[in-house]
């Protein structure tokens, strides 16, 4: 685990309050088995890029990051910031409000993420942009938001995968299964090597290539946790006539 003395400045009173609210319930319903924690930077900015297939994933990943000593900063639905108490906590902890892609009001989530990164903090960006549409929960086609933030800020991007949250809350489910206590594995991988893009023009092709590398790294971690091989072709909602209706466009 990361020495708390090195990350103590991130564990502000607001984050400690949020942890006091969130960690005990998560520990009650799920036993987190963390691996690869040595790959999480002890200090400095980085992008964490996890897989996503359950609405409870952000809580699980947030608690996992708390346990390794780094505080997560998320892009969250702007409507949550209007909820009494919750909204104040989200704002005070530096979370990023984002309007839905189809909203009349526009926001700049990546700009906000870059501001967080510029402060030397950790930003969680789900490359898939929404819950995976893959029938077997494998990571689907990624969007470029995570790599854009990492490349433009010159910071590491750490892939992560988890397996077991579907037992706590199924994909698209609204109810949490409390008993029996579930085991959830969370694995952090080494930073994705994006050195080939240093000094290169960062256009849409470069971002797409780098995103594929990140999705490959996430999928490899997921394969290790599941003990299975992923499909040869990554699920693409556009090829299956599905609307990619995420919380926001990344």
Image (spheres, rainbow, N blue to C red):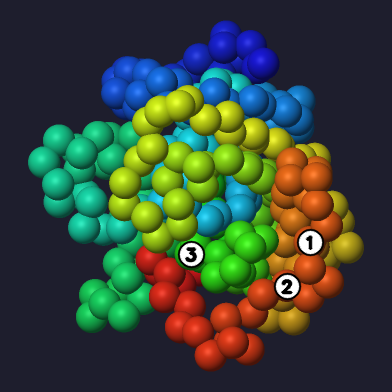
Disc 1 crowd rating (10 Å Cα; few below 14, some 14-19, many 20+) is some
Q: Is residue 12 above or below residue 178?
A: above
The kind of secondary structure element at disc 3 is loop
Identify the image quadrant of residue 144: bottom right
In the shown orientation, is residue 150 left or right of residue 55?
right
Q: What residue is pinned by disc 3?
A: 130
Question: Foreground mark, 3 or 1?
Answer: 1
Q: Position of residue 4 (x, y in %)?
A: 57, 12
Disc 2 crowd rating (10 Å Cα; few below 14, some 14-19, many 20+) is some
- Residue in the image at 53% along x and 90% along y: 241
In the shown orientation, is residue 249 left or right of residue 209?
left
Query: Which residue reaches farthest front?
Result: 180
Residue 230 has which mark? 1
- Residue in the image at 74% along x and 81% along y: 205
In the shown orientation, is residue 213 left or right of residue 42?
right
Q: Is residue 66 above or below residue 240?
A: above
Residue 81 in view = yes
> Which circle's residue, 3 or 1, is located before the other in the chain?
3
């Amino acid at each position: 685990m990361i020495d708390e003395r090195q990350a103590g400045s991130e564990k502000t009173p607001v984050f400690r309050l949020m942890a006091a609210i969130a960690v005990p319930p998560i520990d009650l319903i799920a036993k987190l088995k963390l691996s690869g924690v040595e790959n999480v930077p002890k200090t400095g900015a980085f992008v964490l890029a996890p897989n996503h297939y359950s609405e409870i994933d952000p809580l699980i990943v947030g608690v996992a990051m708390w346990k390794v000593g780094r505080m997560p900063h998320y892009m969250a639905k702007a409507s949550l910031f209007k909820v009494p108490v919750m909204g104040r906590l989200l704002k005070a902890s530096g979370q990023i409000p984002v309007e839905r892609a189809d909203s009349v009001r526009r926001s700049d989530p990546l700009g906000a993420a870059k501001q967080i990164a510029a402060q030397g903090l950790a930003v969680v960006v789900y490359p898939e942009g929404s819950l995976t549409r893959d029938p077997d929960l494998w990571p689907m086609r990624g969007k470029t938001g995570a790599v854009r933030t990492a490349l433009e800020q010159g910071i590491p991007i750490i892939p992560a995968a988890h397996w077991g949250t579907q037992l706590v809350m199924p994909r698209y489910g609204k109810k949490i299964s409390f008993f029996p206590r579930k085991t959830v594995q969370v694995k952090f991988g080494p930073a994705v090597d994006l050195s080939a893009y240093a000094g290169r023009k960062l256009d849409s092709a470069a971002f797409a290539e780098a995103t594929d590398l990140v999705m490959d790294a996430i999928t490899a971690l997921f394969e290790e946790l599941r003990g299975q091989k992923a499909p040869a072709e990554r699920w693409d909602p556009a090829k299956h006539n599905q609307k990619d209706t995420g919380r926001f466009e990344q």
